[in-house]
Amino acid sequence: MVMPRALFTPATMLALLRNLLLLLVMASVSSAPVQAQSILRDAETEQLLNDMAEPLIRAAGLQPADVRIVLIGDDSINAFVAGGQIVYIHSGLIEAADNANQVQGVIAHELGHIAGGHAVNSEGANKATTIAILSMLLGAAAMAAGGGEAGAGIMAAGQQAALGTYLSYSRVQEATADAAGARYLSAAGISGRGSVEFFGKLLNQEMRYNVPQDDEQQYGRTHPMSGDRIRFLTDTYQADPAWTHATDPTLEARFQRVKAKLGGFVNDPQRTLQRFPASDVSAAAHYARAYAWHKSGHPEQAMAETDALVALAPHDPYFLELKGQVLLESGHPVEALAPLREAVARTHDQPLIAATFGHALIATEDDGNFPEAESVLRAAVNRDNENPFAWYQLGIVYAHNGDEPRAALATAERYSLTDQPGLALLNAETALGGLPANSPDWLRAQDITLVSRARLDELRRRGR
């Protein structure tokens, strides 16, 4: 028997299946957890981002306590939402921004996605997936009837239509978020000048990398073209009374500090030292150089920069935190206690700083400091239970005290937070064996076992 000639080869079939898989991924990406990315935790940075976002969150009709701004360690210029009321901002965006107002423009846009339910409402992606699946079924039916070329054509056309549907829906969401962000900035009395400026940066990036800007190229884009966005937003913002409002100078100074601090932490030390030469005696420059020297293993130079910061503001809690951190990590935990204790007090027991203080108390290897370490660390995890480092330190305290069940529970918490479900399950089961039945800690250990088993099952289904 002579089989009919067909363009539907195994390679073509594989390519079409890949397109379908791509659409399925697009449909689920908004609700997928943010994993395999480095979340950067810093007390000063988180407080600044929260303060910058709070008036915008209220303007969006949301509650500040329910919205989180999370910093991702990634040098690309990006921000996104991925389910829930969480705005993720890449460190590269903070570095690229010239001022606080530009970042507020980005936050306002992302809040537009949250308020619009864009991360949850996958209507466009669902439609695209439906089109893709139908085209696969119709194409397969045509092939089964002997029409190989016709079947391949149906599938290819269906994939193209599905992709067009998804991209069109995505562009509508982005335009909607732009308009919502403009409303929030206006309601909060914050200028939209920074938003326009930042889109200008994105346009320059696109031009630099030869991203086409003509209408014919818009089909393949998930976002509206930057030039169009700039024109729309400029007209909108310039007509708003807040256009001429200046950013609060204190907020702007805090932003420049944090930007320099972040750069010193994530960038190559030599790059930081070139960008902030010794002749620059601003607080931001001292901050950046302190992190650069500390990161490159030069504790004396790091301490000199830190002392210069403390001299500028002797009771600034974040300068004191840095001084304690440098002392602790250069082998002087006893000397680190005083600045860290004051930093904790002046930030009203900020949990990230408290975790470092607890670490310093443990690192003294003085048994007399362990009761205070336990108190400090228990308070820290009660206020912020998503800090693996704090749980690790608390586990050390429990083990030192001979409380193995709670040491195992603290370890289970840590492994659960770092997505190591096998180890989390093992330690949670150990904790269950030694904790009083139905006590709060026993119930928490039981919760971790259930979550860890579910996560292990999920990983097995994925073949990991």
Image (tube, rainbow, N blue to C red):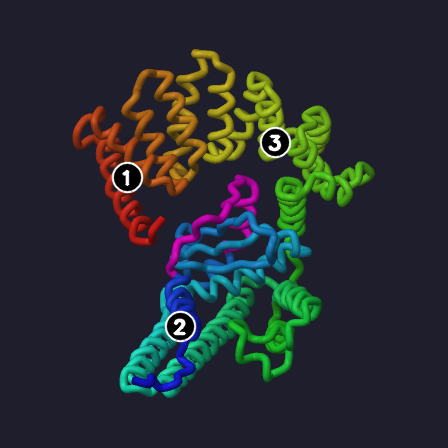
Cβ atoms under marks 2 and 1 closer than 8 Å:
no
Q: Which residue is mark 3?
A: 322
Q: Position of residue 346 (x, y in %)?
A: 53, 32
- Kindly indicate the quadrant of the structure image that contains residue 342: top right
Would you call the spot at circle 3 few (<14 residues within 10 Å), some (14-19), or many (20 or more)? Answer: many
Q: Nearer the viewer, mark 1 or mark 3?
A: 1
- Of the residues shown, which amino acid type is indicated by label 1? Ile
Query: In this rendering, would 285 be left or right of 441?
Result: right
- Of the residues shown, which amino acid type is indicated by label 3? Leu
Query: In this rendering, would 182 be left or right of 405?
Result: right
Residue stretch rendered in magenta on the structure: 31-54
Q: Which residue is mark 2?
A: 10
* Residue shown at the point (58%, 62%) measured from the top left: 105
Residue 399 position (above or below residue 132): above
Residue 50 is inside the magenta segment: yes
Q: Which residue is mark 1?
A: 448
Furthest toward the right, the residue is 279
Furthest toward the front, the residue is 1
Query: In this rendering, would 315 be left or right of 63?
Result: right
- In the image, 188 versus 110, the foreground residue is 110
Query: In this rendering, would 232 be left or right of 1?
Result: right
Q: Earlier in the sequence, mark 2 or mark 1?
A: 2
Q: Secondary structure at mark 3?
A: helix
* Residue shown at the point (75%, 39%) measured from the top left: 273
- In the image, 418 versus 285, the foreground residue is 418
Mark carried by residue 243: none
